[in-house]
Image (cartoon, rainbow, N blue to C red):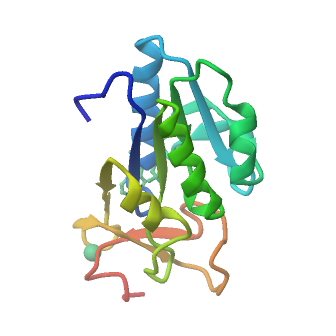
Amino acid sequence: MNFIPKEMGWIEVIAGCMFSGKSEELIRRLRRAEIAKKKVVIFKPEIDKRYDEAYVVSHSYQKMKAINIANSGEIMKYVEPGTEVVGIDEAQFFDKGIIETVKELAKRNIRVIVAGLDQDYRGEPFGPIPELMAVADQVSKTQAICVKCGNPATKTKRIVKSDEQILVGAGDIYEARCRGCIDKD
Ligand code: ADP
Ligand code: ZN
């Protein structure tokens, strides 16, 4: 994203598999917005308590202060007048209401940057991310590195046994895999 529109709302989506740098990229964009003296607010779902509760944290331990929310309906309560940029991490865990919320924020001339998993561990589109990608003005697909072969990875392999769609964890539970290695042990 080189060109950021002025006086117009805008929706950016950063989507990809685990370890693909979504949180890093979200943090990078939000830090640049802060450097530009924009009023920024960041949200994450309460469900993701892997690290510090009130921070967006990347696997490379970069972090930014965030607000934990239980559902998309809470976002508007925390968006004060004058807010210019809203960041949302782990958006796959939110309800579909997030799509309308994000559109409403953009209507209010806010730059919205949403990061989330595009697919679950079975390779199925995850929660509201597919629709967010559809309504976004700009989409970035991030790639990790396949831990088996070193190719670009676009899939997340669950390496423990569980059929739950949502099982929160990091390197102990998930690996980044390429399309060729996703079904290997
Ligand atoms: P995401 O939000 O997409 O899960 P993060 O931004 O939290 O990703 O973390 C990206 C960082 O994870 C990389 O910069 C790197 O330090 C680390 N990492 C660990 N395993 C991998 C992998 N298999 N491929 C790429 N990066 C990895
Ligand atoms: Zn591979």
Above or below, 78 relative to 47: above
Q: How many marks?
A: 0
Residue 25 locus on image (x, y percent): 39, 40
Decide if residue 92 is on the left or right side of residue 146. right
Of all residues, the one furthest to the front in this rendering is 107
**Residue drawn at (41%, 63%), measured in percent from left and top?**
17
Residue 94: horizontal and vertical position, in percent?
A: 64, 59
Q: Nearer the viewer, residue 33 or 144?
A: 33
Residue 80, quarter of the rendered image:
top right
Asked if residue 159 is positioned above or below residue 25 in the image, the reply reads below
Q: Is residue 12 left or right of residue 149?
A: right
User: Looking at the image, is 93 positioned above or below residue 21?
Assistant: below
Residue 181 as seen in the image, left or right of residue 115? left
Percent across and percent down for residue 29 are 40, 31
**What residue do we see at 56% from left, 43% from top?**
104
In the depicted view, which residue is nearer to us: 49 or 11?
A: 11
Quadrant for the C terminus in the image: bottom left
> Residue shown at 32%/54% (left/top)?
142
Find residue 151 and report its image quarter: bottom left
Q: Residue at x 72, y 32 (%)?
A: 78
* Residue 83 picture location, percent across and down: 58, 23
> Is residue 142 at all visible to an observer of this figure?
yes
29 is higher (above) or lower (below) than 139: above
- Tell me the quadrant of the picture where the N terminus can be found: top left
Looking at the image, which is closer to me, 119 or 133? 133
Res 149 → quadrant: bottom left
Does residue 52 appear in the picture of this structure? no
